[in-house]
Image (spheres, rainbow, N blue to C red):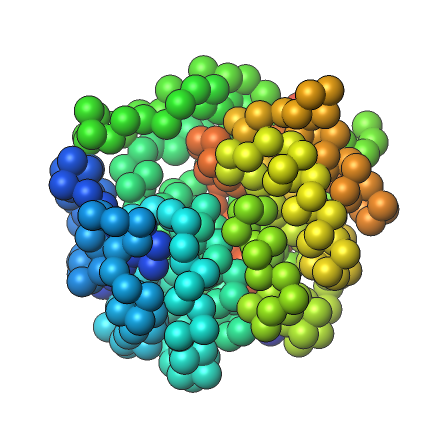
Amino acid sequence: MTLYPAPLRPGDVVGVTAPSSGVGPALRPRLEVAFDALRGEGYAVRPGRCLDGGGVVSAPATERAAELEEMLCDPEVRAVVPPWGGELAIDLLHLVDWDRVAGAEPTWTVGYSDISTVLTPLTLLTGWASVHGANLMDTPFRQPAGLLPWWDLCVAAPGEDVRQSSPGRYQDGVFVDYALHPGATELELDGTGSWQRLDSTEPVTLTGRLLGGCVETLTNLTGTPYLDVGAWADVHAPEGVLVHLEAAEADALTVVARHLHGLRLAGFFDRAVGVLVGRTSAPDADGYTQQDAVLDALGPLGVPLVAGVECGHVAPRMPMMSGALATAEWTPGRGVLTQRLV
């Protein structure tokens, strides 16, 4: 059974630490806007020591691991939300005392991109639910109709259902420049399109325990104790795994095809009942699209493949709770995800 943290309540403390990249001086105003967004929802903010943006990472790996572990084990900290991802969260995994974390009261942990490198092992090693959703710097953006902010998942109590649907619009452009627009709260959703099934045109309903993240980061964990999906599924996901994955920026051959093939060969999809593929702005290869790559690598699984899902680097983002029992429903032009905290 999945271990759900206690529902967030007004006055709860949200810890902010950067397991990967920190925030430089030019982007500090945006960080303050994000803090204010949390305070506006009634939460207290506790910034950590590891937030410096002067290098590739916010602090040495030992310090980042210690602060992350400290926040996850502190009963006063009810959620941990990094400012954003980066490149090297992988270097702290072996430094975290995961047994100590597993023995603590579960804490909400939220993020995407390189934060997948922490979130997925956290769920697999402890059984805790975690939330693949907006990082802190994206938190001030208002969600379009159909989608919820990440904290609306975290206020749900065990036994509750949370339903979201694709808004049919997305940001078909570059990231907002937070240095120029630190107070941005509105996404320019200038693209149109909803989910689409890649392997068939038949409507489909999929039910399983959610698990997933960013392809470019998770692929580096194959063959390690930090991506043992089978051991987790034996205990926590007898219903099967509803996988969600997305590509950040690399082309279809470099990342999606090779990495997805590698994940499949390593057994990552062995318990999959279906795969939800995030919308991406990453480039195609010559005559080989991102969708071609997904079909090439994951078609042999023989499970439904649904693309264009709001779970990645293209805004808006549908927060998804790893460990929750979820039902994804697809019909042409429509995508609905219901997450049940059981």
The residue located at (20%, 48%) in the rendering is 54
Using the rendered image of the protein, determine whether residue 279 is visible from the camera's viewpoint: no
Whether residue 193 is visible to the viewer of this picture, yes or no, is: yes
x then y, percent, for residue 155 = 38, 57
Q: Quadrant of residue 106?
A: bottom left
Residue drawn at (74%, 53%) of the image: 264
> Can you say which quadrant of the picture contains the C terminus?
bottom right
Left or right: 278 with respect to 179? right
Closest to the observer: 101 or 95? 95
- Quadrant of the rendered structure where residue 5 is? bottom left
Where in the figure is residue 210, as x and y percent of width and height? 61, 55
Q: Say whether residue 59 is left or right of residue 215.
A: left
Tell me if residue 271 comes above or below residue 307 in the rendering.
Answer: below
In terms of depth relative to the viewer, which is nearer, 66 or 331?
A: 66
220, 105: nearer the viewer: 220
Q: Where residue 340 appears, x then y in whole percent?
A: 57, 57
Tell which of 220 and 311 is nearer to you.
220
* Quadrant the N terminus occupies: bottom right
In the image, taking residue 33 as reference, residue 154 lies left or right, namely right
Q: Residue at x 44, y 31 (%)?
A: 315
Residue at image point 48% right, 31% down:
314
Image location of residue 248, percent across then percent down = 51, 38
Q: How many marks?
A: 0
